[in-house]
Amino acid sequence: MSAQSPSLDGEWLDESATRQRLEKTWDDAPGLWGALTTLDHKRVGLRYIVTAFGFFGLAGVAAFVMRLQLAHAENDLVGPDLYNQLFTMHGSTMMFLFAVPIMQAVGIYFVPLMVGTRAISFPRLLAFSYWIYLFGGLLLWTAFFLNIGPDAGWFAYVPLSGPQYSPGKRVDIWAQMITYTELSSIAVAVSTIATIFKQRAPGMALNRVPLFVWAILVMSFMVLFAMPSVMIGSSFLIMDRLVGTHFFNPAEGGDALLWQHLFWFFGHPEVYIIFIPALGMVSSIVQTFSRRPVFGYPLMVLSLIATSLFAFGLWVHHMFATGLPRLGNSFYTAASMVIAIPTGIQIFGWIATVWLGKPRFTTPFLFIIGFIVVFVIGGLTGVMLASVPLDLQVHDTYFVVAHFHYVLIGGGVFPLLGAVYYWFPKITGRLLDERLGKLNFWLFFIGFNVTFFPMHYLGLAGMPRRVYTYSSGLGWDGLNLLATGGAVLIAISLLLLAFNIVRSLRSGAAAGANPWDADTLEWATSSPPLSFNFTHIPLVTGSHPLWDSERLHVMRGLRLDERELVLTTVLDAQPDLREPSVPPSIWPFLAAIAVGTMFVTSIFSPWAVIVGAIPIAITLTAWFWPKSAAEEEIEQ
Amino acid sequence: MHSVLQALGVHAQHIELVWHTMLWVCGFMYLLVIAFLIHAIWRRRGDSDAEAPRRMSVALAGWIGLMVLGLFGLTLTSFLTDRALVHAASEPQVTLKITGYQWWWEIEYTNPDPSRQVRTANEIHLPVGAQVLAELGSNDVIHSLWVPSLNGKRDLIPGRPTEISLQPLRIGRYRGQCAEFCGLQHAKMALEVVVESQQDYDAWYERQLAAAPPASEARAARGQQVFFNTACNLCHAIAGTDAAATVGPDLSHVASRRMLAAGALPNDPEHLRRWLQNPQREKPGNHMPIVSLGRDDLDALIAYLGTLQ
């Protein structure tokens, strides 16, 4: 540190002077350049959220068209080719481009705020991950609008998705999109884990970490273990398709079931990757609106961890019909049953919190009540599916479609919509309209149940999944029409949400820093938060910083003229190091373009991997180019 | 019949019992959760009760105990049923080989005596009460055989033989359908299981063994010529003639089947005509090409196929 350094510890600055200096250090450059180079986790997180909701809209429209097609027997609104593309796009987009990214995105935005730090760890990796994600999603949807959308299902079972039965580029595009977006998912997980482990505010020992942050931590670890499995699968698939390998070709010693194992070893944990962060949202909202801490905090944390571990031990229950050895199947039955216990404990925990607290029936809270009512049905049908004999009947029928929509919409989207109403004021500084919010909730709740509840019966009545049409006279007509009617209600409720958001952005009531009187640190800063999150790093002395005492304790001593963070120890969050945080850079963006170009062109020629490696190497080298001591001095 | 809840096979009945057990146990648990939730929301809130959290912990312990007990019971039910399913139909009287094609089913009745083997498509005949073992395979992609009223489903996987057993308990027609997404016409890949008395079954079996009768009537004879002189015989077989291709369904006794094109159309002259005129209209994407035939040729071909009882 040179002697001329303008900022000195111990120099007493008033609040606004401190803030001015921090703004000078942390604010992005204005305009497009700032937008492309930003490393602000809030900007990147918000981009992720908006992009993911965009894909949610597209996939929702796909679902709506499918519901119209199925409204009555022998309908010819869309043919089999388009229908197969639609359900492939719906599934792939919802799982890979909406559900996982949006959960990670809420984590990206709020975890650094909740743990009381100025920036996320590895911010350039995070910026890189967003561009990768965006390009992957655009690739998929561009292909769809060019009528070369993938059509082998979101699960892309071989040999149907293999070179022989899916010629053309459709499945290539799907496979590369998977590898590509999962890469971004892993990058986000790395950033998030490092932030949670090393950047918590001093005093925020692990037993004081908010449940939402715990949930994101657990989910991030799951991402690290689950995503490589599907990336290996999609890489094998693209090699089978493009360079003539035979990983999945039984005629050459490959195995069609290998794909299913690789896919479901990812695919089952994937459900919990979506569900666990949602549980974190539930905990945040229940706690705030019950005005008391969540009941049984240690048990809630242990349940999250237990769920994440069990989640890796039950992928075979997607494969009971493949004729694997029965003794092995029994193990997966037991594992699938056991995972109900930690989930049941958490459900109890939230209801107990409401029971012990003084609930306020705001829109976010309504969505959580809806979550319990809907999700528990999905959990219980999950218990049914764990049983091998029963699964053999209802597997791949509309019963399963009903089941996982109860789990994913009930367990994912309900909490997420609650979270939108809950955190929107923090992100924008404006409240959403409560009356419209409640209308939004009731329409969504009723529409959801009208759409998906009849599907349980349709499955039992023999209607298989992924059929573009069905004959009349099988007794499926009426309930299908009813389900389509429910889909109309869902569409209206989501349009209402969009209207509410637009209206609030223009003329919503100002929120203030802490409109809900919540306890966690994101509410300790302004709404929307400043680029550096906190003028002073909070000092945590309890589990509920904003409830425990009238005034928030803070620490001083970080540089104002440079991006600097305080690192703390993993367990007790004792202050450990002062660590610089990197300045904005264009290189992550350029590296993402280089990687994207390589991935897309590799669909057309394997040589693209070799040629494309050159720009990747250049951009990565520039990204990581070390600074000499002299340069660092000049920057200071 | 086509429903899990109309179980008319031994296996399906075992499974139906699991369904009812599950429904009652899970229904009870659900009501318990909802009752707790409603009470939590609407209970009258008096002064703060210091004892409440402790009582809640006791309730939690009870809840965990109940969940463990319930899940243990359901797991046991599942295991016992699975065991019963393994033991059911362990001494098969009828053995079949079913092969999945995009998008139809090939059915072969295996027999140690090659002259008593039967090959047909999309329609399985079984004697009532008989124990049946079907070996499953696939010619292309993964399919899944599912006749809900008789048993759960089993996948047909290329390179990996699987099997399924059936034991139908009542005479009747049972609909089955492919349950694993297998491409464009997955939706129209159905089959029919015809369960009949032992005499009817035996009579049917003997008819299937017979070669096709010679096309004696003039129009049928011309139809046979059409069959051989256009493209039909390149894909289809008719026992007792030179047509022996195995690309498409065996047509030796096609007129005896109730449905056409794997359940896509009823098998009558009118629908057969529509099908032959343009197979891509009724089942777009299927592998049968359009073979353009003159009106007379088409009439003759339909007449010929009608003789293949």
Image: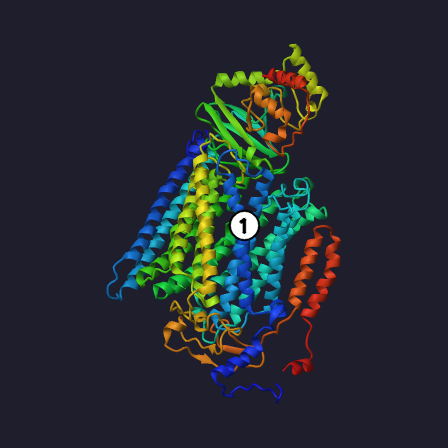
Q: Is residue B278 visible?
A: yes
Image height of A459 relative to B278, above or below: below
Camera-side residue of A614 and B272? B272
Q: How many marks?
A: 1
Q: Quadrant of residue B294?
A: top right
B18 with respect to A627 (left or right) = left
Q: Quadrant of the N terminus of chain B?
A: top left
Q: Quadrant of the C terminus of chain B?
A: top right
Q: Is residue A303 visible?
A: no
Q: Quadrant of residue B187?
A: top right
Residue B242 percent across, percent down from the top left: 70, 19
Task: State which chain disc 1 sits on.
Answer: A
Camera-side residue of A309 and B145? B145
A565 with respect to A489 (left or right) = right
Q: Secondary structure at mark 1?
A: helix
Image height of A509 relative to B133, above or below: below
Residue B182 percent across, percent down from the top left: 59, 38
B187 with respect to B220 (left or right) = left
Q: At x 40% / y 64%, what residue is drawn?
A: A298
Residue farthest along the bottom direction in this orientation: A3
Residue A472 percent across, percent down from the top left: 48, 31
The amino acid sitting under disc 1 is Ala
Camera-side residue of A230 and A484? A484
Q: Quadrant of residue A127?
A: bottom right
Badge 1 is on which residue?
A59
B99 with respect to A389 (left or right) = right
Image height of B194 relative to A618, above or below: above
Residue B174 percent across, percent down from the top left: 48, 27
Residue farthest along the left direction in this orientation: B46
- Label 1: how many residues lie within 10 Å, few (<14), some (14-19) or many (20+)? many
Image height of A113 relative to A491, above or below: below
Q: At x 50% / y 44%, what residue is drawn?
A: A329
